[in-house]
Image (spheres, rainbow, N blue to C red):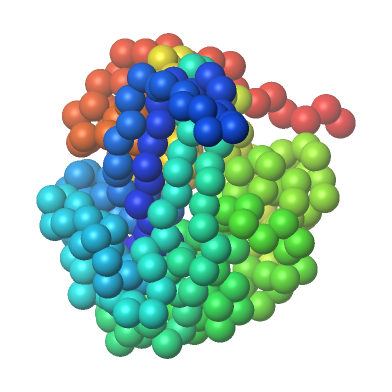
Amino acid sequence: MDVICIGMSVVDVLARGVTDVPHDGSTVFVERVSMSAGGDALNQAIILSRFGHAVSLMTLVGDDPQGRFLLGECAKSGVDVRGVTISRQFPTSTTVVLVGKDGERSCISQHGGTADEYGLSDIDIGLISRGVKVVSVGSFFCSEALDTDAVPVVLKAARDAGAVTVADFVQNRPDVTATDLVEVLPLLDYVAPSMSEAVQLTGKTLPDEAAEYLLDAGAHNVVIKLGPKGALARNRSERIAVPSYATDVVDTTGAGDNFMAGFIHGLLRDRPLADCLQFASATAALSVRALGTTGGVQGLADIEALLGRQPLEQALPEPSR
């Protein structure tokens, strides 16, 4: 395998064109209702496979129709599922995604599904072996069992295997901060929170200050996703800011996961950090043009066309001194 994506897989039930929420037994009509694969690890795996990489998914799904649907989506995309564990105790995590006219989404999720319960006992550490180039955790704070018990073991195994380690975040546990990551940050080559996640982790409201805080806490490279403002990467020797691409927004669901897939693609191609960041930005821009988490990006040709033709918005400026 080129890359192992480990973490959250869910079924997304998407309602597009939501203008109101029904109440008192009423019905609200929307433009479209559909079902798609979702979850940080699965989204990354599908997009990376479309980019031509050999990808393995390590996750937990239920022994139910939703779990079988997710396995089928993996098969369609050529994602290896030897690391997928099937639970007969917990249902496959399912999220109802309400997508507004502007493409922004709100989510309704269940507690106690497979994404919440995924832990070390579900993981075959032996699959993380020599030859794997990247191990990506998608994401921190989706499962407490994954965060506290499994991730340190996974990252140490990845380091022993010679793999580059990457992680992004979700805001499912609002009480956690960077101090909860002191054991694992030094094991990560790249951490990639969104700006809102960076604020939660660090208490800093400016991207450069948040990145500096995470570097001081032990991270080797910090990538902060800034949505329409682009992205920022910092390490001890570089500061790189790339702008976002102008795009038509249909649905922002999964844009961060697509960003991560684009970034990892650059790492797998041994590209400089600036190139990784720019490819990630283009991948995220394409992803929001279609409904669902993986419908907007079909392959490398789409990204390369966008990189070659479309002008960029303004990049994040250097902080004032």
Q: Residue at image x 33%, y 84%?
A: 124
Q: In this picture, is 276 found above or below 166?
A: above
Q: Residue at x 42, y 87 (%)?
A: 121
Above or below 148: residue 208: above
> Is 314 on the left-hand or right-hand side of 260?
right
Badge count:
0
From the viewer's perspective, is residue 74 above or below residue 258?
Answer: below
Can you say which quadrant of the picture contains the C terminus?
A: top right
Closest to the observer, 55 or 96: 96
The relative height of residue 99 versus residue 256 in the rendered view (above or below) is above
Q: What is the x, y in percent for residue 270?
A: 34, 51
**Residue 259, percent from left and from top:** 43, 40
> Would residue 36 appear left or right of 226 to someone viewing this image?
left
Q: Which residue is the extreme one toward the right? A: 321
Position of residue 137 measured from the top left corner of the image (x, y, whole percent): 46, 64
For the view shown, which residue lies furthest in the front direction? Answer: 25
Q: Nearer the viewer, residue 107 or 73?
A: 107
